[in-house]
Amino acid sequence: MNQPSLAHVLTPKWRTARQRLREERSRGGAGKLVILTIVGALFWTGVYGVLYFILRYFRGVEELGPLLAAKLLGITLLSFISILVLSNVITALSSFFLAKDLDLLVSAPVDWLRLYLAKLGETLLHSSWMVALMAVPILTAYGVIYRGGIWFIPYAVLVMLPLLLLPAVVGAALTLVLVNVFPARRTRDLLSIIALGAAGGVILLFRLIRPEQLARPEGFRNLLDFIAVLRTPTSPFLPSEWASRAIMGFLRHDIDPLPLVLLWTTAAAFVTLGAVLHARLFATGFTKAQEGAERFVRGVVWRWTVGTLLAPLPVAKREFVLKDIKLFFRDTTQWSQLILLAVLVVVYLFNMKALPLHQGEPVGFFYVTLVSFLNLGLEGFVLASIAARFIFPAVSLEGRQMWLLRSSPLDLRTLLWSKYWVGTIPLLVLALLLTGLTNVLLKASPFMMVMSLATIVGLTLAIAALALGYGALYPQFETENAAQIPTSFGGLVFMMTTIVLLAAVIFCLWQAVYTYVHAVYEGRPVTVGGWMIACFTVAALLCAAATAIPLRIGLRRMEAFEF
Amino acid sequence: MIRLENLTKLYGSFVAVDDISLHIPRGVLYGCLGPNGAGKTTTLRMIAGILRPSNGRVLLGGDDVQTDPIAAKRRLGFIPDRPFVYDKLTGSEFLRFVAGLYGQEGGAVDRRIDELLEVFELTSWKDELVEAYSHGMRQKLIISSALIHRPECIVVDEPMVGLDPKGARLLKDIFRQFVERGGTVLMSTHTLEVAEAMCDQIGIIQHGKIVAHGTMPEIRSQHAAGDASLEELFLKLTGGHAVRELVEVLGK
């Protein structure tokens, strides 16, 4: 029998993608495209700009310059492949074992090699597109600074392709082995904890060793030591090093074919080995993946603890809130992200403590107040990121069960109310904790402490409402993975709106803080006068509007949902 | 009990449900039949308040589903064709949650949950997460959830899909008893034998319109069908010629 071509096996995928684009266009997606293009262009320009200036500086340094540039590229590519292996393992689990089209493909007379290649391609595309896009401005900066010329473009593509392919093969193979040991659904749980734990650990370690100290000249005994460190390859047996050598060789017009040959031959060998492994293990792994993750759960603890706390609420609200909390803590992919969040909070506080404001020379009251004030904006951004991850997907995650909620006498207002407070209360606790602790660490004045705490309460209420409102306005009912929802267009618009809100509130409050600092500087008593009250009122009104309007719009949008 | 007045649903220029008016009194089991894409599920979802009609209205026990949804939905138990439930809740937790949506709690709900799980042979699974349930078990759980608040009417889309013969028989008995006690069931099905054996009244939908409606003898006499079976009637009204031609093509 003639086997279907690989392109034929992949037909449903690209046709679906094309259809989605068409639907988007017919829904008037031009506005979306413009916003995405602007944001993408800004991001690219930012990355390109930063790297351009660094590389231009490096180019001006005799001897050391090219070494530093190569080292930087090596480290960047190494971090790329580390991220890619992790993301490929998680993506491969979905595409090779949990995807909806597998029943059809496995039951059809499609040979294992085509199945492997089709799914490998899918895994590669889903997990690598972001890194590939990120590489564009970085490599462009290298190409421009070192005058790579037009031929640098195809050459860079030639180098990057095997570099992206290798982690995909490794990730798929690792997943294959893991699924043969654990059931797929358990593996997903396990992986999400390991991945986030590892990521958290690396971040924490990286921050706690205080890399900024390495930049101090007294850290090196002499220049030769420093050069020796730079000349040592970051990791001679890793493809990132070969890619870095290949690219820097081309840019220095000293082309050595060996790194490129190494990259392509290793990629070919890995694909072959991966295919052999797939032929041996896929059938048993796929069978295991069908096994349910049976778990015997008694929800009594939840009912006694959280249920008792929620007792004053009407029964529908109580059961709804209880349900949301249970679902969150029983889904490993959801709560495991709290590990990362905890690490980020520790790093944040550590950074505040490490600021040299109170070390050595006494720093003026002005700087402490300024940092304490700007800290508000930064915290707002952190809270927005958390809200994007945990509150924004709340409505989307109800999609498949909406038949139940809409056919029951549950008022949509109750639903929205429950979702809002389930998300807002933990966010508020975190916000108050962060603000209070950072202000204590900064030894900020009572005025700043009170103003920061009051502002962060207003901002948190508004950010949570914006996240929920935009989540209802741009729902993703078809997405099964909650982690993918914030990266949608709606998530982007939410973040942009939040940044505008933060800027507006900070601007209003700056007027009040300026008056306060001025009074202290001149030794006058601080009085909360008409101007200050006006500033505070405008900020409070902004927060109130950003709370009420999105919730109202979200409710209206939910009432119009059709399933 | 269930009254549809000029119910219409448009998707752009496509008319999914075309000006349907219907009254199903208390104590009646009504079967809604029709080929795929005829508009059955859309009609049922409008009755359940999941879809908004483009025109017309739905009354449940006199309460309008659009203008007085809370009162109308309190009377209703809805069973969809696809059993999507929260995977990370256990069976008993899901039922308690649904009871809560209908404002019910306490010991009576606990007893009702035990009773329903026992009837549907899910007692040993009550503390298992739903993600471990089979399709049929999920279907049984959803049927239990539709009964938990003792509704006055049940709207059910393809109730037999996924059920084993024992479960299917049990469901038929439950529905019969429910209507004998004065409840109303509106059921869409493709299983014509089930509809013929169970339903007091039947409606056949084609291209969003009711093309036949009444008891079996009434439909036969309306269409001068003698003592034709429901299957023959259905094929006659919904394009039996096409089926016969198809059979000939496939038989070649």
Image (tube, helix red, strand yellow):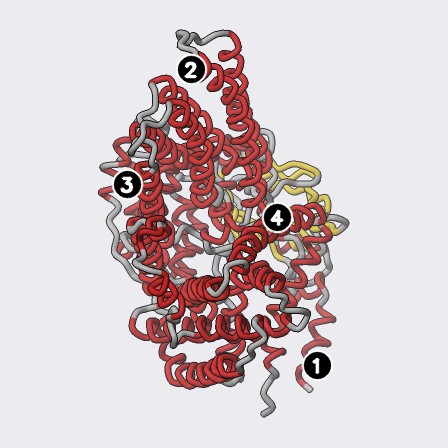
**Residue denoted by label 3:** B110
- Give the alpha-carbon distance from disc 1 to disc 2, as whole Å: 97 Å
Q: Residue at 58%, 42% (x, y): give it.
A: A493
Q: Which mark is residue A42?
A: 4
Number of the label disc, if any, that sits on residue A528: none
Q: Nearer the viewer, mark 1 or mark 3?
A: 3
Question: Mark 4 and mark 1 in contact (Cβ < 8 Å)?
Answer: no
The C terminus of chain B, quarter of image: bottom right
In this view, the mark in front (2 or 4): 2
Residue A346 location (% of width, % of height) = 31, 42
B118 lies above or below B240: above
Vertical side of A98 occupied by B127: above or below: above
Query: What residue is drawn where x is 46% and y is 28%?
Result: A459
Q: Are marks 2 and 4 on the same chain?
A: yes
Q: Residue furthest right?
A: B13
CA–CA distance in space, label 3 to label 4: 57 Å
Residue receiving disc 1: B248
The residues bearing labels 1 and 3 have C-alpha atoms spaced at a distance of 56 Å
Question: Which residue type carries mark 1?
Answer: Glu
